[in-house]
Amino acid sequence: MKRIISTCALLLLCSFCFATDIEEVIAKAYQNSPQVEQYERSRQDSLFSNSVSDSSYKYSITIPESVVHNEKGTYFPTAIVSVQYDNSKINAGVKGSITSSEFKTNESNYPYKLIGSLEVYKTFEFKDWTTTDYARKIRDVNLEQTYAATVLNFRKSVLADVYSIVDAKHSLTESERKLAESQKDYNAKLATGELKEGTTAQIKAKMALDSTVSALDSQKKSLESKLSSFEKNYGFAYTDVDSASRPVLEFVKNADGNSKVYVAKLELLSAQQALNDKTGKGSSITLSANVDPTVNFSIGSGYQDTNLALGADVGLKSGNFALGAGVVESFTKKDGWGTPAFVVSGSYTDGNKNTKEINDLESAVLSKQLAYDTAVFNYNTSAKTVEDNIQKALVAYDQLEIRKDYNNRILDYTTTLYENGFTTAKALEDARFEVESDSVDELLLNLTALQLECEIKILAL
């Protein structure tokens, strides 16, 4: 009898005999899943595209014309260089041409006349964050948050599917065990005459047994469906899991919220900036400066002519107010330096009129303020939910430890009784089943806690 019981116990252990750690299954799911590959590819493509369009340094050199040489002379093209760094822009350009033509006179010892011109200009602009800057930052934050959350949700889905399969297998094993006991009890009652064929009691007992069989078939089909879905979703057949580490469940609430709150704040600031740009309230200062020296000269005995023109202007703009100042001075060989010409210009546009555009911008600010407040509220609500779930998980672990200790003690006690002939084989089998069930419950609890860990990490993004 002891050999039979030992064999039954071994078979029972085999029913819970898993073979893989959950992290191995998740790693394989990552490797095989086209979804994860697409997530990574999409992120890399976006990062590359953004880096090209938003490079801190931008420069270009443009030569729109080619060098021309003909009987009238040689013409050099215009060269334009543009450099941009973040929000500060520097433009520099050089334009010029040199022509040489045959010039013969009785007074000249020089056979050629050379005429050239040169223009150099430079522009500076310094400005605070613009709506474009906010849009780029929002885009970058959303890109990283979406990618990280997507990967964590994928991990969570694998954990949830494995949990479902482990739970279904355990329930099926328990149902098969109960069915075997019910079948054994039914047959024993028929054999002893406690149940007689055709009686109401026998018919009811048979119906209950058939109902259990039908429920068991339904459980088997459900498990088969879960296994089939797992293979379809992750590209490999499910391998029984025997272990899952218990995560450290900790969550520290951030006073500033998470990236969703941050994005909502950036959108609010962007809307406020757009309104300020229109109304002139709180606008940053834009400074620009231009220098335009022009030199013309010719070489030829008796026909030499040189003139130089210098021009510079500075512009200052803030909101609806603009101020400009410019000066021009020229020099010629004949007249020398002329009198500088100085011009001051200014303008102001009333931006506080109740126009439809301003109304729309004000409405956008209110809308973004509401969205920001909602994001803060949602973060605080989710944080409270996560904190509550952490406490529930910790309580569940404590209760599991108490139950494990109790069932292990019962198994030791029942084993001693059985070895001394004071209890039945069924009692020993039941005690062993409870201990093995505790192992499965611990695995399920760890799988649940790992899902909660994903939620914590997503909330903290």
Image (cartoon, rainbow, N blue to C red):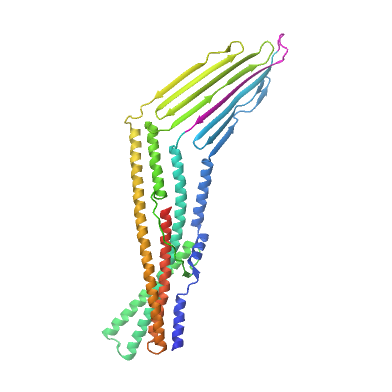
| Residue 225 seen in the current view | no
300 sits to left or right of 143: right
Span of residues in magenta: 104-126
Q: Which residue lies furthest to the left in this view?
A: 200
Q: Locate residue 67: give its quadrant.
A: top right
**Between 318 and 196, which is closer to the camera in this rendering?**
318
- Residue 248 makes an appearance in the image: yes
Instruction: State the residue at coordinates (50%, 34%).
Output: 88
- Residue 181 lies, in percent from the top left, at 37, 82
- What residue is rendered at 49% in x and 56% in y? 36
Q: Was residue 105 drawn as part of the magenta stretch in this picture?
A: yes
The overriding secondary structure of the stretch rendered in magenta is strand
Check if residue 83 falls in the magenta segment. Answer: no
**Quadrant where the image shows the N terminus:** bottom left
Measured from the top left, where is residue 402 in percent x and y?
37, 73
User: Which residue of the protein is positioned furthest toward the right in this rendering?
Assistant: 109
The residue at the point 68 percent across, 22 percent down is 70
Q: Eyeballing the image, is 48 above or below 122? A: below
